[in-house]
Image (cartoon, helix red, strand yellow):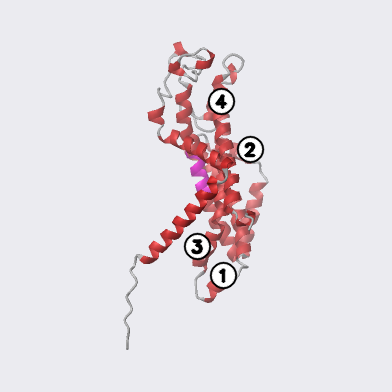
C-alpha cells in the first residue's frame, strides 16, 4: 500500500525558528531578572534612551536659546526657580533641556560608532581567522600598529586633521574602534574552527562564507554583544572628551562634553554648569558598564556553573 506524504508548508521552518528565539529570549530575561545589578544598569540605560527619543516632549525649553537675565541661575534646591529646576548656564539656557537633548548626541554617536566598528571588525576578524594567510598577516600587523597609539590622542589627531563635525567625529572613532572587535572575532574564529561542527559542515558541502555566517557567527555572537555593550560606554566618553576639547560637536548644539567645558570658568561660583552634565555622563557610562558585565555573566556559557 503506497502512502502519500503531505508537503511541509513554506512557513513551518520560520515558526520553528521563532519559537526557538522566543524561548532563548525568555531564558535571557529570566537570567537578567536574577542579576539585579545588571537589571538596574539596563533600566537606567533604557531611561536615557527614552529621554533621547522623547526629548522634544520632555524638555520644557529650547536648548539653544536663553535669556541673559536668567544667566547662571542656581538649581531649585540651591534657591533657584522650578521653571529652571537644574539651573541655567552662562547664556541663560535651561540646563535640564540641554542635558535632555545632549543625550541624543551621546547615544547616537555611541550606538552608530559601535555598530560600524562591530560590523567592520567582526567581518575582517572572521575572514582573517578562517582563511589565515596573507590577509591575516596584513590585518593583524595593521591592528597592532593602531593599538600602539592611545585612543584619545589618536582621535584628537584625526579630528585636528579633518576638522570638527558629526561625520568626522564618527570617522575618527571608528577608524580605530574596529580593532577590538577584529581581535575578538579572529581569536574566536581560530578557536571555533578547530571544533567538530566546522569540518562536518565542510563535509556536507557548505561553502566557506555560509559556514562563517550560519555556523560560526551564532556561536560567537554573545562575545561580540558583550564587547559592543562595553565599548558603547567608551565611545560616549570619547565623544564627550572631544567635545570638551572643542573638536567634537560644536555649539550651540547641546553636547555633554562641551557643556562641561563651558562651565570651567564658573566652578567656584556656579558649579552646577559643569557638574550636572558631568554627572549625566558618569551615570550613563556606569550603567552601561554594569549592564555589560551582567551580560557577560549571563551570556558566556564558560562562566555558568553546571
Number of the front mark, 2 or 1:
1
Residue 32 spot, x, y in % from top left: 54, 47
The residue at the point 57 percent across, 69 percent down is 198
Distance of mark 3 from mark 2, alpha carbons? 35 Å
Q: Which residue is mark 4?
A: 260
| Dot 3: element | helix
Structural crowding at the residue carrying mark 4, measured as other residues with C-alpha within 10 Å and reported as few (<14), some (14–19) or many (≥20): many
Q: Which residue is mark 3?
A: 213
Distance of mark 2 from mark 1, alpha carbons? 43 Å
Q: Earlier in the sequence, mark 1 or mark 4?
A: 1
Q: Earlier in the sequence, mark 3 or mark 2?
A: 2
Distance of mark 2 from mark 4, alpha carbons? 20 Å
Q: Could you say which disc has been placed on residue 153 in the image?
A: 2
Residue 166 spot, x, y in % from top left: 48, 37
Distance of mark 4 from mark 3, alpha carbons? 44 Å
| Dot 4: element | helix
Q: Could you say which disc has been placed on residue 262 in the image?
A: none
Q: Which residue is mark 1?
A: 197
Image quarter (top left, top right, bottom left or bottom right) of the C terminus: bottom right
Residue 275 spot, x, y in % from top left: 58, 23
Q: Quadrant of residue 172?
A: top right
Q: Main secondary structure of the magenta part?
A: helix
The residue at the point 54 percent across, 63 percent down is 216
Q: Earlier in the sequence, mark 4 or mark 3?
A: 3
Above or below, comparing residue 136 to residue 34 in the picture: below
Number of the front mark, 3 or 1:
1
Number of the front mark, 2 or 4:
4
CB atoms of marks 1 and 4 within 8 Å = no
The part of the chain drawn in magenta is 108-117
CB atoms of marks 2 and 1 within 8 Å = no
Number of the front mark, 3 or 2:
3
Amino acid at each position: 500500500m503506497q502512502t502519500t506524504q503531505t508537503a511541509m508548508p513554506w512557513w513551518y521552518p520560520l515558526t520553528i525558528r521563532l519559537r526557538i528565539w522566543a524561548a532563548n529570549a525568555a531564558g535571557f530575561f529570566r537570567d537578567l531578572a536574577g542579576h539585579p545589578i545588571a537589571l538596574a544598569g539596563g533600566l537606567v540605560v533604557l531611561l536615557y534612551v527614552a529621554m533621547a527619543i522623547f526629548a522634544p516632549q520632555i524638555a520644557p525649553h529650547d536648548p539653544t536659546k536663553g535669556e541673559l537675565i536668567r544667566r547662571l541661575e542656581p538649581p531649585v534646591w540651591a534657591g533657584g526657580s522650578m521653571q529652571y529646576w537644574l539651573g541655567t548656564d552662562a547664556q541663560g539656557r535651561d540646563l535640564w533641556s540641554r542635558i535632555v537633548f545632549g543625550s541624543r548626541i551621546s547615544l547616537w554617536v555611541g550606538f552608530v560608532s559601535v555598530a560600524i566598528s562591530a560590523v567592520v571588525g567582526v567581518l575582517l576578524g572572521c575572514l582573517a581567522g578562517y582563511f589565515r594567510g596573507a590577509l591575516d598577516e596584513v590585518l593583524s600587523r595593521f591592528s597592532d600598529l593602531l593599538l600602539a597609539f592611545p585612543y584619545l590622542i589618536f582621535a584628537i589627531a584625526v579630528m585636528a586633521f579633518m576638522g570638527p563635525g558629526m561625520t568626522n567625529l564618527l570617522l575618527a572613532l571608528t577608524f580605530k574602534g574596529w580593532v577590538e572587535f577584529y581581535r575578538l572575532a579572529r581569536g574566536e574564529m581560530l578557536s571555533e574552527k578547530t571544533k567538530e561542527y566546522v569540518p562536518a559542515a565542510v563535509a556536507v558541502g557548505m561553502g566557506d562564507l555560509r559556514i562563517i555566517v550560519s555556523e560560526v557567527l551564532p556561536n560567537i555572537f554573545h562575545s561580540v554583544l558583550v564587547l559592543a555593550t562595553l565599548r558603547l560606554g567608551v565611545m560616549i566618553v570619547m565623544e564627550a572628551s572631544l567635545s570638551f576639547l572643542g573638536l567634537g560637536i560644536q555649539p550651540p548644539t547641546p553636547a555633554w562634553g562641551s557643556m562641561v567645558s563651558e562651565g570651567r570658568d564658573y566652578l567656584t561660583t556656579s558649579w552646577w554648569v559643569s557638574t550636572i552634565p558631568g554627572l549625566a555622563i558618569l551615570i550613563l557610562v556606569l550603567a552601561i558598564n554594569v549592564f555589560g558585565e551582567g551580560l557577560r555573566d549571563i551570556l558566556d556559557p564558560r562562566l555558568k556553573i553546571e
